[in-house]
Image: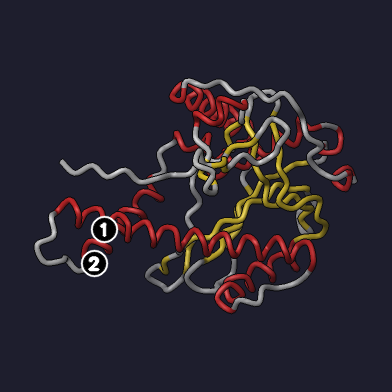
Amino acid sequence: MILIQRESASHWYLPDGTPYHEVPRADGNGTRSATLRDARKVNALPSVTNTLSVLAKPGLESWKQEQAIVSALTLPRREGEPLDDFARRVVTDMSEQVRSAADLGSAVHAAIEVYLQTGESPENPDVLRLFEPVKLWIDDHIERVATVETVVVHDGVGFAGRIDLVAKLRHAGTWTVIDFKTQKMKPNAKGIYQAAFYEAWPLQLIAYFEALRRAGECSRKLEDIASVVINSVEPTPVQVKVWPRELHAGFWNAFQCAHQLWCFTKGYQPAATAQLPQVSAAVAA
């Protein structure tokens, strides 16, 4: 039996919201990703995405399996190479494809952050071509920005995370917690690119939403949560889903259940001991 472990980084935050993603190596040579063992020592809180890792993600796993199959079919087999060694190279090659997609997504996210804060567009042409549709959407739909890339801490449940954007939508007139996703969209039979909206996304958003609401009076006007999907294949118009308000309570309940499951499987019950001021007073207007 061939068993090959793939590394998966988990994000953590200290109770005051300070990122705790990496720790120094024991030999003093650089840093490494923080582990559960490291988190226990400092009462670190899991990120929202870390918490939701306990949920099955069929869409993501199918895409990773596709990358593995493509790697296995296209990677040349070395003469006399043992099957175990070839399998490890396939996993390495597949991981590079997954990492490349993640890097592109991070670059687009960074471009969005810079644009929202400074109005400047990215210079990298590969990033710019995918960023342009997002810019058009922002210019047309965002009336006011409250906060960009802000860390929130829920001091009751015990988790933290970084929100992409809290803004007032021009046409709806509502303050909304927004998360940007890059996705490799595929055209349908009519050649139209269609995004897939996954069931874990509103759970991620509602966790941010509830952390903001718990933060205090400044966030009392929050009403909506929305996913904005960016095509990572072609610069097509972004696709947006404002998740129904009547489902918010169910989303929050599901997230808390996921958090309890995460705590059970990890044997770790984190507890936040500090609360951050989460969002500017602009939301109060």
Task: Using the rendered view, name the quadrant where residue 155 is placed.
Answer: top right
Q: In x, y percent, where is residue 190?
A: 41, 72
At numbered mark 2, what does the secondary structure look like: helix, strand or loop?
loop
The colouring scheme, among rainbow, by chain, secondary structure or one colour, is: secondary structure
Reply above or below: 55 against 130: above
Instruction: State which quarter of the image contains the N terminus.
Output: top left
Q: In x, y percent, where is residue 57?
A: 41, 43
Kind of residue at disc 2: Leu
Q: Looking at the image, which residue is at 55% across and 25% down? A: 40
| Badge 2 vs badge 1, beta-carbon distance below 8 Å | yes
Image position of 68 (left or right of 46):
left
- Nearer to the camera, 82 or 27: 27
> Residue 89: which disc?
1
- Nearer to the camera, 27 or 181: 27
| Neighbour tally class for label 2: few under 14, some 14-19, many 20 plus, Cα within 10 Å | few
Q: How many labels does the image show?
A: 2
Q: In x, y percent, where is residue 53?
A: 47, 38
- Nearer to the camera, 85 or 245: 85
Q: What residue does disc 2 label?
A: 75
Q: Which residue lies furthest to the left in this view?
A: 80
Q: Looking at the image, which residue is at 70% across and 34% down? A: 153
- Nearer to the camera, 40 or 245: 40
Kind of residue at disc 1: Arg
Image position of 177 (left or right of 77):
right
Reply above or below: 278 against 100: above
Task: Using the rendered view, name the quadrant where residue 124 is placed.
Answer: bottom right
Measured in 3D between alpha carbons, the distance from the residue under mark 2 to the one under mark 1, in whole angstroms, is 8 Å
Q: In x, y percent, where is residue 199?
A: 49, 43
At numbered mark 1, what does the secondary structure look like: helix, strand or loop?
helix
> Residue 138: which disc?
none
